[in-house]
Image: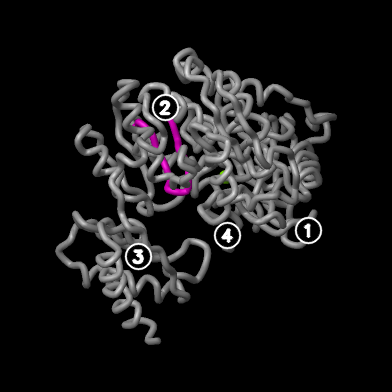
Amino acid sequence: MDRLFGTDGVRGVVGSELNPLFIARLAYAIGSYFGEGSRLLVGSDYRYGNNAIKRIVEGSLLLAGLKVYDAGYAPTPAIQYVVKTQGFDGGVMITASHNPPEYSGIKVIGPTGIEIDRDEERVVEEIYWTERFRFASWRSIADRVEEYPYVLDMYVDAVVREVDSERISRRGFKVLVDPANNVGSLTTPRILKRLGAKPIVINGNLDASPARYPEPTPDTLVETARLVKVYGCDIGVAHDGDADRAIFIDSEGRIQWGDRSAPLLIKHLVLNRGERGRVFTGVSSSTIVEDVLKPLGVEVVWLKVGSVDIAHAMRRAGDALCGFEENGGFMYPRHQFVRDGGMSTALFLELLAWENKSASTLFDELPRLYVLKTKYRMSRDQALRVVEFVKEEFKGERMITIDGVKVIHNDYWVLVRPSGTEPLLRVMIEAKSEELARIILERVEKCVKQVVPQ
Ligand code: MG
């Protein structure tokens, strides 16, 4: 059975892949999965075609006999928070997150606010492919979609409630916000104002042709980072399209990846907020987190790459302090189990308010490792064979093998794994020196050549 869901939701190019027939059929399958009478909250970010997609989704859900509530434009974490707290049976978020502007997609949210898990996705896919749709009786079909314009307020309130707003307000932080012309512009500036901060917003209007590429990375944030320094901000924050990620830029205008901001946030949770629990992250995150957390007695649980799996693992575990991804997704279970760009921003300000140090000083206190990332084009089978050779090459070292292989040594770590979405082998190395990183890469390349001779 062909998969419709990727790592996070169903994605496709608007118009061709996400055409009316496909969308209606998928929405009908989602409606059949939840069942007649279920209450679903539907939201959307700002992209080409999203308004049209939403109408098809909502109409299909109505005809499947569901009660449909329309939240309008909102960040994914806002929809997720309201689904969880307001007793909805689930939700649908129309977004392609960080993908290019020609894409959109559909995320299906369960009653816990987390995207449905892999098994549940399979159930939806099976209904889709076998066309085992559940037809609703004509009497049970609601005559309209209910407007539900409360999501942004509920979400902003919840985030602000979670932090010490008095302590933060006393500092009067100046914060640069870059929501990539998308829905983060509806909430993050409001959160900041409520926390007594002065937001300076760039790329802040809703625009389906965003001025900045929707994925916040060191390549796409060059101008944003420059402005953080120019305006003398205490911190900068950049979101992806649906604002579940937050990448921070320090007061020196340096872009800090998610696995550098997360250790700082976690230290804050433990030392300043007095919270305990285990930390959950994907194997692609830096081992710096272990170096920082070991002295505090905080255990790190390494998982397969993918935020949905991390969120479900945290919920099952019951003792999660937080979860994170290196791409800027930070999950704080006291608020909700999923990535939340607004929540991580509020927590970062609280950290700055406690520490009385600049953001760049705090980041400078973290260990510095030299980073090397590369990829090799090959089939998934070939990639899996390379992984086996790498295990052999580094025999005797500490290894995590749940997603490719990650070798962890005192002076370096290396992750070798097949891409989840493309015919690629991905290699990530962090080492105490550039020279050591190159030596490790040579050892990995030796393994690559045994499978794919160049
Ligand atoms: Mg996203």
- What whole-number distance in Å separates the C-alpha atoms at marks 4 and 2? 44 Å
Q: Nearer the viewer, mark 3 or mark 1?
A: 3
Q: Which of marks 3 and 4 is in front?
A: 3
- What whole-number distance in Å separates the C-alpha atoms at marks 1 and 2? 45 Å
Q: Is residue 33 visible?
A: no
The magenta region covers 320-332
* Residue 243 lies in quadrant: top right
**Earlier-in-chain disc, 1 versus 2:** 1
The location of residue 247, given as percent across then percent down, is 50, 42
> Cβ of disc 3 within 8 Å of ligand 1?
no
Q: How crowded is mark 4: few (under 14 residues within 10 Å), some or many (20 or more)?
A: few
Q: Name the residue under label 1.
A: 15
- Kindly check if marks 3 and 4 are in contact, taking CB atoms under 8 A apart as contact: no
- Name the one closer to the observer, 351 or 289: 351
The location of residue 19, given as percent across then percent down, is 77, 57
Q: Mark 2 points at which residue?
A: 352
Ligand 1 placement by image quarter: top right
**Earlier-in-chain disc, 3 versus 4:** 4
Q: What element carries label 3?
A: strand
Residue at left offset 85%, top offset 29%: 143
**Amino acid identity at mark 4:** Arg
**Amino acid identity at mark 3:** Val
- What whole-number distance in Å separates the C-alpha atoms at marks 1 and 4? 20 Å
Q: Residues within 10 Å of mark 2 (few under 14, many from 20)?
A: many
Q: Mark 3 points at which residue?
A: 416
**Earlier-in-chain disc, 2 versus 3:** 2
Q: What element carries label 4?
A: loop
- What whole-number distance in Å separates the C-alpha atoms at marks 3 and 1? 36 Å
Task: Determine if the magenta segment contains residue 326.
Answer: yes
Q: What element carries label 1?
A: loop
Q: Which of marks 1 and 4 is in front?
A: 1
- What whole-number distance in Å separates the C-alpha atoms at marks 2 and 3? 35 Å
